[in-house]
Amino acid sequence: MTAAAVGRRYDEKRSWIRRSLRTAVRVEGWGSAVAETARGGGVPAGRGAHPVGARRPVEVAAARAGRGPDRGVGLTYPRIVEEVTGSGISQGELGQAVGASLRSVQSWAAGGAAPRGASRERLLDVKYLVEDLQDVYTPEGVQIWLHARNRNLGGRRPMDLLIGGESAAVLEEAQRLSGAM
């Protein structure tokens, strides 16, 4: 492909993105920040470039009609997964810690499904743990604490205990650190 052809293709994609965002702003009222992004061209190239956490108009229509991945699933679980994985826990580790597959965690993160039963309870426990640790440590410190051996946990790693289903001991130690106990 020549440089001119690459340039034309880039311009076509950028135009498509701008049209999509203008439609989304008009149809769904995403607000001036999205409109400004569309005018400024700061949107990454590619199909489906939408603001983080925003749904495409097709998804909104499907949700309103009572079908599609957002039926009954709010943005709460995707935010929880984002917060937890932003603290240094990978989606794979999170899946192991809550007793779910990586694919399930990815679905929760995308808003396509919600955790149920014991997985939901364990996910909320991990979220609570991360919040406690964030009161004491920087994001990097939280990651180090979760993956380093801990004297107060018998020389075991908190992440290993979470994966093994022993979240109570890890929560207790995090609360001790944050002064909640």
Image: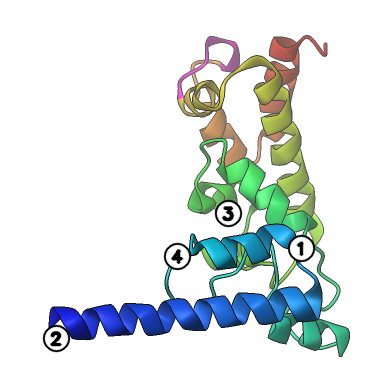
- Please give the label number shown on residue 44: 4
Label 3 residue SS = helix
Residue 14: in magenta span: no
Q: Nearer the viewer, residue 82 or 154?
A: 82
Q: Do the residues labelled 3 and 4 touch (CB within 8 Å)?
A: no
- Please give the label number shown on residue 1: 2
- Please give the label number shown on residue 95: 3
Q: Are marks 3 and 1 in contact (CB under 8 Å)?
A: no
Query: Mark 4 or mark 3, which is nearer the start of the sequence?
Result: 4
Query: Mark 3 or mark 2, which is nearer the start of the sequence?
Result: 2
Residue 149: in magenta span: yes
Residue 164 is left or right of residue 31, and the answer is left
Q: Are marks 2 and 3 in contact (CB under 8 Å)?
A: no
Q: Name the residue under label 1.
A: 31
Label 2 residue SS = loop
Q: Give the range drawn in magenta.
A: 148-153
